[in-house]
Amino acid sequence: MNQKNILFVISHFNSSPSIELDILGIRTGGYHPICCLFSHEETLFEKNLKDAGITCIRIPYSGKISAFSIFYNLCCLILKYKPEIVHCHLLWAGMLGLSAAVVCGVPKRIIPRHYSDMHHIYYPKGVWYDWYCNKLATKIIATSENSLESLIDLEKVSQDKIKLIEYSYDFSIYDNIKKERVQSLLNKYNPDKRTPVIGVVSRFVSWKGIHYIIPAFQRVLDLFPNAILVLAGTEGDYSVELHQMLKSLPDNSYICINFEKDILALYKTFDVFVHTPVSKTVESAGSAFLEGLMSGVPCVFTLSGVANYFVEHRKNAYVVNYKNEDDIYNGIIACLNGFMKSKNIENTQEYIRNHFGHNTKVEQLLNLYAEPNK
């Protein structure tokens, strides 16, 4: 059987197990994936794909100044590999990848929407970029109900152009987190054995609500002076403000981790995990909700993204109001006092495995790729 080339254009990923699984899985449907990555150096994402035999081409990205050279290189790649489909992930990959695909006459051009109304609230210029990508794409993948509603209600995209395909994950990797991996991270990031450990896994952007977690943790120190706040994924356009807030804490009471490749083991080092986006719709999906619950750690959440549909207060997490440091503080204390029941955690994990497993995701993608353009 002749394989059909599909070019994935991807910007700014260090790691994404879900998208790795997608790219590897579509090979079962007769596709030959080629990945173009915007990066100056090899990422864990690229390494994993190469190890699995995927062709990867890296193009250095230096902001808007590099846009023309990237566009030119993408056109050259398309002319070389002649893909039937160009599938882009994230904004600049979409802007440049879809543009090159149109110029080179690629018939199927796909982009997933990895967020919902974020640009409409926080980055108004991004709405124009989204409009441009929406126009050039022949299909838009809504990765959650939130992103689907934003596309239809806010951006007036025709429902015929949208396909709902939710995120999916390989949850078997949670079954093999050995104690040695967890202990190695404890030794690395918490050598003084401070406890309890309050964990946050989130980019430093304003809508993640970290600026409400920091003052809540400051109050936790009054009751637990040996506590430590672990913040992972600390890049983003709100980093200056958050680092300034962190200066109000004792120096040895927090640690910032830019990137940790063994993120699943890092969750296991937490006594409480906190994830508090500032509105119901600002998270499109929110993999941190699923990762926190699958880790078995007591969680403090606001309801956003996928959490809207199955997280219940005091059943599988401590649910707090948006933008409320008092609630976050109370939630952390409740978690430390052991309100969670192990049976509830097990039931939630079973639900997540059944609903967000990767079994049907590849089939949905292959069906999408096979659809005729309208």
Image (cartoon, grey):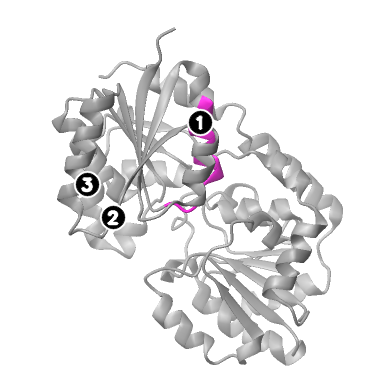
Give the main secondary structure, helix, strand or loop, of the magenta stretch. Answer: helix
In the image, the segment drawn in magenta is 13-25
Q: CA distance from mark 2 to mark 3?
A: 8 Å
Earlier sequence position, callout 2 versus callout 1: 1
Give SS at disc 1: loop
Q: Residues within 10 Å of mark 3 (few under 14, many from 20)?
A: many
- Which one is nearer the viewer's eye here, 53 or 273? 53
| SS for callout 3 | helix
Task: Tell me residue 133's x, y (percent).
Answer: 24, 42
270 up-or-down from 71: above or below: below
Classify residue 318 by image quadrant: bottom right
The reply to whether the C-beta atoms of the residues labelled 2 and 3 are less than 8 Å apart is yes
Q: Dot 1: within a 10 Å radius of its alpha carbon, few (fewer than 14), some, or many (20 or more) residues? A: few
- Image vertical order of residue 192 relative to residue 286, above or below: below
**Three-letter code for the amino acid on which mark 3 is drawn:** Ile
Name the residue tied to disc 1.
53
Residue closest to the eye, 313 or 340: 340
x then y, percent, for residue 291:
64, 53
Compared across the picture, whether 15 is left or right of 173 comes to: left
The amino acid type, in three-letter code, at marker 2 is Tyr
- Residue 70 circle label: 3
Q: Is residue 24 magenta?
A: yes
Q: Is residue 235 visible?
A: yes
Q: Is residue 8 left or right of residue 184?
A: left
Q: Residue at x 69, y 35 (%)?
A: 354
Q: Earlier in the sequence, mark 1 or mark 3?
A: 1
Compared with 14, 272 (above or below) is below
Q: Is residue 241 magenta?
A: no
